[in-house]
Amino acid sequence: MAQLEKISYGGWKNCLKLSGDGLELIVTLDVGPRVIHFGISGGQNLFKQFEDQMGVTSGKEWISFGGHRFWHAPEVFPRTYALDFDPVEHEWKGNVLKLIQKTEAETGIQKEIEIGIRDKTVFLSHRLINRSPWPVELAPWSLSVMAAGGRAIIPQEEFKPHPDVLVPVRPLVLWPFTRMNDPRFTWGDRLITVREDAKVDGKQKIGMRNAQGWAAYELGSDLFIKGISLIPNATYPDMGCNCEFFTMPGFLEVETLGPLVTLEPNAATEHEEKWWVISNVQLPQDEPSLIAALNPHLKSVGLPVIKA
């Protein structure tokens, strides 16, 4: 059974530690909300923390803090970068922690995140509520800022030879600053990997329609797997992306998005994720061996394996 404990953390006096099944999360209540720490109990923090921003509770410009955050897409300045320095309310009911952000003055949107732990799985439901008097088009967008030194692992669609299938299976979306020859990318046959590398300067981002139901981040001997969904025939932002990845020296973001919707006043839309962490994992670099090592872990959490 999950347990909740009020603690101070990283310079913030009011945080909550949610733990259970060998997992632990720390969320901020003075700002955010952020899941500022996540991992195996007593183990490393899989999420990036910006040390110069820890404990900060005010400012005139949005700051990341690190951790896992919740935005609404598409990304537009200044709407996306609404300040989140206000205290966060919370409810603890039935082993589910509900975080309630104050309605954004700039947008009229209120954000809620519900978090629960059971069966060694973290369940997250991200909710956007339109508190403005007019309809708003948006999409829920959850971003996990992963700690430096790891690599994201992204499944390709199942291979089928020409001419068995003649229609495309998914978009791969690039930004104006994306360089496909950047050494942090590996464009494999069954997998795409993106490394965080402090020695390689510049920002990189890719997005895609990911129907395989997961993306992962390897950090040391820990494997973080994020379960995601794709709603058939729904319209997703950014040319059809439900999954995006951004990196620059110091961190890498594993991002998922829900469909674009038009929210009427007081209506809500939700976006769900599942998180798993598998410890003591050794993953090879070459793709065939990597697939062979990954598949048992995917199967263990109920996700489809990668077909060779």
Image (tube, helix red, strand yellow):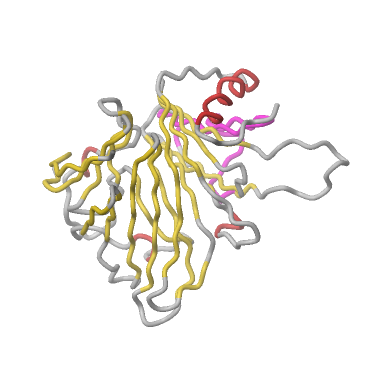
Q: Quadrant of the C terminus?
A: top right
Whether 286 is drawn above or below 108: the answer is: above
Quarter of the image where the N terminus is located: top left
The answer to whether any part of residue 199 appears in the image is: no
Residue drawn where x is 85% and y is 39% of the image: 162
Q: From what the image shows, is residue 56 above or below residue 181?
A: below
Q: Nearer the viewer, residue 201 or 234?
A: 234
Q: Position of residue 280 (x, y in %)?
A: 41, 18
Quarter of the rendering containing residue 107: bottom left
Nearer to us in this view, 278 or 219: 278
**What residue lies at 64% left-to-right and 57% top-to-bottom?**
232
Instruction: Decide which of 303, 294 is in the foreground and name it.
Output: 303
Residue 280's place in the image compared with 302, above or below, is above
Residue 191 coordinates in the image, percent (x, y): 62, 32
Q: Specify start and end residues of the magenta stretch as a single range.
A: 174-201
Magenta stretch containing residue 176, yes or no? yes
Q: Position of residue 282 (x, y in %)?
A: 48, 17
Does 13 sit left or right of 215 as displayed? left
User: Residue sitting at 16 percent across and 53 percent down?
Assistant: 57
Q: Report if residue 83 is visible in the image.
A: yes
State the image coordinates of residue 190 (x, y, percent, origin top left): 66, 31
Left or right? Give the position of 190 relative to 97.
right
Q: Is residue 1 magenta?
A: no
Of all residues, the one furthest to the right in this rendering is: 163
